[in-house]
Amino acid sequence: TASRDDTSRLWDAASGDALAVLQGHSDNVVSVAFSPDGTRLATASWDKTARLWDAASGEALAALRGHSREVFSAAFSPDGTRLATTSWDKTARLWHAASGEALAVLEGHSDGVPSVAFSPDGTRLATASEDDTARLWRVFRTTQDLIDAAKEELPRCLTPDQRAQFYLPPEPERWCVTGAGREAEPDPTQWRPLRPYHTDAWRDSLLAKDRGEEPELPTQ
């Protein structure tokens, strides 16, 4: 539970027995959330911070500082690795749920943001604001996820001359021939090759390599 007495409390849900008092905030605690595995708690407070706690002992784990006004809600990602918070400072923020490290500031609303929720797969955030809008945000769980998305949005492959200029192997990355995100697609009719690797010669060369052959690289 969360309270205007600046604390949150842990209780035995079967008996109602008091288990721990979570002290550390210096203003009203307005929201509390359990991590998906039940091992941690996140609290949001008008003291401009969110805090992480050990759910078994009530021990304070981290104070999440960065918001410039009251923090109103906190939500864990479905896999428990990220925490999202919202504030009257018109932003939402993403944090590393284990360390409390700040990861991103989500700016765009023109008024306070009282609520936030993750999509079931953890790749989207929804925020609700007093500016009469809700917003959807994309969340990248790993650096590779971000790279893959960037390749899909703005894919670019180095030309053979550019590869030689930078002392790279002459053979391009597989996704240059198959299209980003289609590296495992066996049907070449479903490929979306990128220039200058969009020719039949590059397609046939990659297919031959997949058959275990050692074809010469195309010259065009």
Image (cartoon, grey):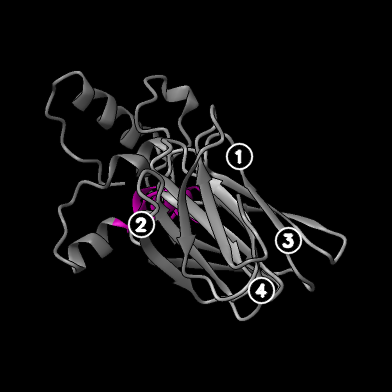
Disc 3 element: loop
Residue at image mark 4 = 70
Above or below 82: residue 90:
below
Which percent across, then down, holds residue 142? 37, 50
Residue depicted at x 39% and y 24%: 185
Mark sitting earlier along the chain (2/3): 2
Q: Is residue 62 left or right of residue 26?
A: left
| Left or right placement of residue 5 versus residue 186 in this view | right
Callout 1 secondary element: loop
Q: Which residue is mark 3?
A: 114
Label 4 crowd (10 A; few <14 / some 14-19 / many >=20): many
Nearer to the camera, 37 or 55: 55
Residue that carries the numbered disc 1 in the rendered image? 119
- Secondary element under disc 2, as helix, strand or loop, is loop
Mark positioned earlier in the residue sequence (1 or 2): 2
Helix, strand or loop at label 4? It is loop
2 or 4: mark nearer the eye: 2
- The kind of residue on which mark 2 rests is Glu
Magenta region? 140-159
Closer to the chain start, of discs 4 and 1, is 4
Q: Nearer the viewer, residue 132 or 57?
A: 57
Q: Position of residue 42 (x, y in %)?
A: 50, 54
Neighbor class of circle 1 (other Cα within 10 Å; few <14, some 14-19, many 20+) is some
Q: Earlier in the sequence, mark 4 or mark 3?
A: 4
Q: CA distance from mark 2 to mark 3?
A: 26 Å
> Residue at 26% across / 47% down in the picture?
172
For marks 2 and 3, give the one nearer the viewer. Answer: 2
Is residue 220 within the magenta segment?
no
Specify the label residue 59 is tagged with. 2
The amino acid pointed to by label 3 is Pro
Cα–Cα span, label 4 and label 3: 10 Å
Which amino acid, by three-letter code, is at mark 4?
Glu
